[in-house]
Image (cartoon, rainbow, N blue to C red):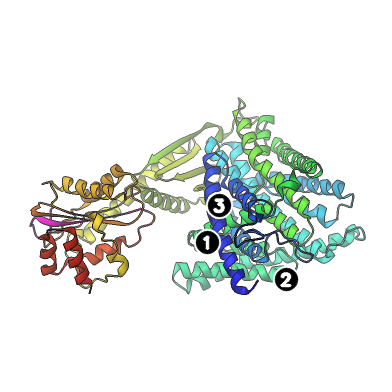
Amino acid sequence: MDITEQVSALVLQIGIILLAVRVFGKLAKKAGLPSVLGELTAGIIIGPYALGGLSLPFFPDGIFPLALTETHTLAVSLELYAFATVASIILLFSSGLETNLKMFLRYSFAGGFIGISGALLTFVAGTLCGVILFSTTFWDPRSLILGVIAATTSIGISARTLSELKKMDSPAGVTILTASVIDDVVWIILLAVVFGIVSIMDGQSGNGFSAAAVALLAGRVFGIWLGVTVLFLLCSKLIASFLKIFKNSLDFSVLALGFALILAGLLEKQGLALIIGAYIAGLSLSKTDVAPVIQERIKGLYEFFVPMFFAVMGMMVNVMEVIQPPVLIFGTIYTLAVMLSKLIGCGVPAILFGFNHRGALRVGAGMSPRGEGALITCGIGLSIGVLSNEHFSAAVFMIFLTIVISPMLLTMAFKLPGKGTRKPAKNDDSVHESWEFDTAEVADLVLSDLLKELRNEGFFIQTMNIDEGLSQARKDDIAIFITEKKRFLSIATSIVDMPFVKNLVYEVVLDLSHNVEKLKHSLDPAKMKRDLLDTHARVTKDINALIEPCCIKIGLKSDTKEGIITELVDIFASAGKLLDRNQVLQDAFEREEIMSTGMEHGIALPHAKSDGIAETTVAIGIKKKGVNFGSIDGKPSRLFILIASPKKDCALYAQFLAAVGSIFGNEALREAVINAETVHEIMELIKKHKK
């Protein structure tokens, strides 16, 4: 296959993967499951062991042919795995950015003890499973990799489940979230040490290695990790200052990701996994003021690459191998071992910190799900040849089961009647408040200012997951949990702290309202409106293409502004352009209430961004007698141009509004259009104007 064919095949494969992960991710969410489960399933279904390997016209070996050879141990092509590797770097860079280091250090005692205990016990349990499976020593690379896979916890899955249960601010919830952050760091350290040992042993069985030799190797790799981490944390402000030289937030955010890629590559050369460098890069920037900006700016890359990573991991699972008795039995035993070790490793220390058996069960269940970290470790183990395809499939099977079982177990644990602590705890009397705003944009604005004010009050802020809209704020023994979903902002905290939260939200809303009023006085929209119909505005082919014959109507009937807008929206409906007529009408009326869209020279320009329409669309209506539309010059409007576009995909919306002056600003053309007898005549007049 030549280079052109390879690239063409890769482009097609990426397109299919993106489509599949979105569809299956959405289906998983609708079923109340994490999207990662749907993305993994998508990979399994379209992968080389399933539909992707079927012979098709022009694809005799399938769209995703099996790539296994004597020298290539992966089921997918090297190119696809490279994409997955870049995705894992972006994922860990984002995780590092989300880690609040100050909070981590301040609240790490109880959570830290629980997280470390759970991670280490599960590492030992996972490794022992490998020792039994392979009939080898504890230091065998295969056993060690199985141990690292077992040691992880998915903070995203735990946080989402706690949020749905409204238990994020409970004593168990706070402990789970804190311990999960610590657990992530322990996993990174374990991975660094084990990967260093595996790299140096170069796939040997480990039988010839003494415990002292392994300890020496582990110490060397741990020293490199610790030294680089401390160095970059100390230099974090210098790094941030360098990034700010580039001014534009998009420029320095992409540069920060480039910095993470470089550090990942350099540490891999020192025997550490690529993702460790990425995590350190994110962690070093997490305590700087550019961290939230970088998070927001790379979100598009995250959404593109990370689901692809989960799909590629799924594509390497051979379902036929998983259902084979030896693999199925080992996968089940492995799952039981790692879940029990988390329950015991996190639950027993929880009892030492004031939880009863009920609370200990909740903490252990919340620490049980595996996710991103476990999958990344699986991929590393397979790519370096330590894990076979059978053992990789068994490990992914374990991850699947924990993702499904752990949220159910956590839910059941919280449904057990009674408190989870031996003594009354402050967070046992938690309450919830919710605020609904007119738009998601307003909710975003309020949340942004609220987090800013919490920081000013001395709170530490941590984003729980880049996708879920979950944040926590901590100060001393105050814990506040914030959830944003579309137009809703929900906050959970102790009953004694809710008055503070309500006051803070009130002040934020009041300040925003005041600033909006000041904006109205500093810039008069009515005066600005007079300059909008500019005849020099750019008019492109795409803008002209928005004017379609099916969306033009001569002889509008209504004599009122509301009636004219309704007729224009009904033009969209007749042309099959609408998803929700009432929603578009409501949004157009709301925009008109803010300020009249009656311009001058007989032109009215009603417009709206609305989720009731699928794409940017223009309707033109004419009423020769004219209607009072509140125009600038006080004259009746006769030419009505309605533009509507989706809120999240408003391509050409503002450009068309600007271009109206160029298209209809010419008096002769405008009068000819208003007095035209047919739609065809109007289209011809506009075409002549284009020329």
Give me the C-alpha separation between circle 3 and circle 2. 35 Å
Image: 408 above or below 278: above
Q: Secondary structure at mark 3?
A: helix
Instruction: Determine the CA span between mark 1 and mark 3.
Output: 17 Å
Horizontally, residue 264 falls left or right of residue 295, namely right
Residue type at numbered disc 2? Lys
Q: Which residues are magenta?
A: 630-647
Question: Which residue bears the numbered disc 2?
Answer: 269
Question: Which numbered disc, 1 or 3, marks the residue closer to the eye?
Answer: 3
Q: Residue furthest top?
A: 417
Q: Residue at x 20, y 60 (%)?
A: 524
Residue type at numbered disc 1: Leu
| Disc nearer the start of the sequence (3/2) | 3
The part of the image, by quadrant, that contains residue 537 is bottom left
- Specify the quadrant of the image occupied by residue 48: bottom right
Q: Position of residue 273 (x, y in %)?
A: 71, 63
Q: Secondary structure at mark 2?
A: helix
Query: Residue 20: which disc?
Result: 3
Read off the residue under disc 1.
301
Determine whether label 1 and label 2 are within 8 Å by CB: no
